[in-house]
Image: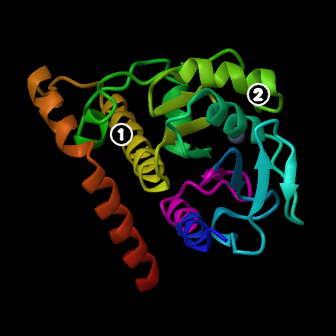
Amino acid sequence: MDEDLKRRMIEAGRILEQAGQGDWTRGHLSVRVPGAADRFYMKASKIGLEEMTLDNIITVGLDGEKIEGEHGRHNEVFIHSELLRARPDVNAVVHTHAPHAVSFSALGKPLQAIGHPGAIFAEGLPVFSETTELITTSERGRAVAAALGAHGAMLLQNHGLVTAAPTIEQAVYLALSLENACMMQLWVEAAGGAKALGKPDDIKAKRKHMFREEMFKATFAYLVRRLTRG
Ligand SMILES: [Zn+2]
């Protein structure tokens, strides 16, 4: 039944929405079905990220076709199907139209490690700029997967962010961290641009501290507790 995994997807959706990444009904997330590498659970279309339930999560194949579920499938399913196809190490994908990430992508500038969240992406943040349109074909999905390469997060220029990770906890952590990093740099850019940045060795050390399994899990658990506090 994989009910626990679906419950974590539901929590992930509520966390992303609470963090300001819900673009009405437009964001989505997926998790590969354990023991069935060629299919994944995904949020349905026409509902908010915070409206997922055990009953409305759909099951989709790597060709992007719905296998199970009564609710509709997002047009941008191919971000998930092609990423999960290209990356056997990835089990969870998040795509949102996070407003700071979208705004930052319009600057056409590399992301800087203004604070801790920025340090997480110090090893590179790919930007998909082939089109700013929706990713509605498997061909475009493959192009997004190619742009992501072996990274865990990327920007879709003038569109949104994508994160891909072994676990949903990590994918959410990266999505929230990337949005915060973009927000911080937008503030700094608005104030004239960064004049002081940490030493490369400091940033490397910070990345190591911030990019840990324990950190992904503890942060997710905290965010779930915060949800229940309202
Ligand atoms: Zn989108």
Identify which amino acid the numbered label 2 is placed on. Glu
**In which quarter of the view is residue 122 placed?**
top left
Give the vertical position of 124 relative to 21 (above or below).
above
For this orientation, the residue located farthest to the bottom is 229
Q: Is residue 229 left or right of residue 29?
A: left
Q: Neighbour class for label 2 at 10 Å: few (<14), some, many (≥20)?
A: few
Q: Which residues are magenta?
A: 12-35
- Residue 159 sits inside the magenta stretch: no
All told, the count of numbered labels is: 2
Query: Residue 194 placed where, x, y %?
Result: 24, 25
Q: Is residue 115 left or right of residue 222?
A: left
Secondary structure of residue under mark 1: helix
- Residue 25 sits inside the magenta stretch: yes
Instruction: Say which of 46 and 184 sits in front.
Output: 46
Give the vertical position of 138 relative to 183 (above or below).
above
Query: Residue 200 placed where, x, y %?
Result: 14, 21
Residue 159 visible, this orientation: no
- Circle on res. 181: 1
Quarter occupied by the N terminus: bottom right
Residue 75 visible, this orientation: yes
Give the vertical position of 66 relative to 178 (above or below).
below
> Which residue is pictured at 53% across the width and 30% down the height?
155
View quadrant of ligand 1: top right
Residue under label 2? 133
Q: Is residue 178 left or right of residue 27?
A: left
> Which residue is pictured at 45% across the width and 34% down the height?
152
Secondary structure of residue under mark 2: loop
